[in-house]
Image (tube, rainbow, N blue to C red):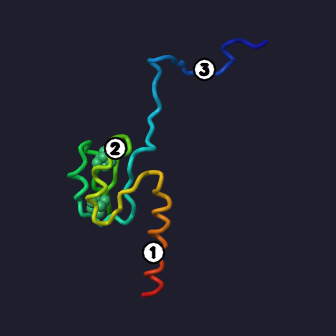
Amino acid sequence: MRHDSDQGVRAPTRSGPDAPVAPNYSQSYIISSDCMDCGVCEFMCPEGAIFEAKRQFVIRKDRCNGCGLCVPYCPARAIVARSGFKERQRRTVQNLLSEALSG
Ligand code: SF4
Ligand code: SF4
């Protein structure tokens, strides 16, 4: 015989205006491996979303509001929209490989 307690525990769900909204990071920016580690962008971000990491600066996606203010200040043009990041990284790696092979 099957009891209610045999069923898995379900997380409570909420709907309506108070329902939690899933974060949408699609408008946020990201820094490619072209970053020269200069740190200029960190001072341009009004949200404090840019931090220095090990070899380059990075953007915290949960803080970036997608304003794009940091983008024109990057001398390496390394700050790209999240949607274009994969393609940008692919080109960066391709260029690095070409340089390494030709040198
Ligand atoms: S401005 Fe560009 S090159 Fe300089 S730290 Fe920021 S992302 Fe890197
Ligand atoms: S797009 Fe705006 S919020 Fe996002 S990292 Fe750049 S300056 Fe900061």
Give the percent coordinates (x, y) of residue 22: 47, 32
Residue 11: which quarter of the image? top right
> From what the image shows, is residue 29 above or below residue 36?
above
Q: Which numbered circle lies on residue 64? A: 2
Q: Earlier in the sequence, mark 2 or mark 1?
A: 2
Q: Which numbered circle lies on residue 9? A: 3
- Which amino acid does the dot numbered 3 rest on? Val
- Which amino acid does the dot numbered 1 rest on? Asn
Residue 55: which quarter of the image? bottom left
In depth, the one of 86 and 58 nearer the eye is 86
- Side of 89 relative to 44 (left or right): right
The residue pinned by badge 1 equals 95
Give the percent coordinates (x, y) of residue 51: 28, 52
Q: Nearer the viewer, mark 3 or mark 1?
A: 1
Q: Classify the position of the N terminus by image quarter.
A: top right
- Label 2 beta carbon within 8 A of ligand 2: yes
Q: Earlier in the sequence, mark 3 or mark 1?
A: 3
- Secondary structure found at label 1: helix
> From what the image shows, is residue 44 above or below residue 19?
below
- Which amino acid does the dot numbered 2 rest on? Cys
Q: Are marks 3 and 1 in contact (CB under 8 Å)?
A: no
Q: Are marks 3 and 2 in contact (CB under 8 Å)?
A: no
In depth, the one of 21 and 68 nearer the eye is 68
* x 31%, y 55%: residue: 71
Q: Residue furthest right?
A: 1
Q: Are marks 2 and 1 in contact (CB under 8 Å)?
A: no
> From what the image shows, is residue 39 above or below residue 69?
below
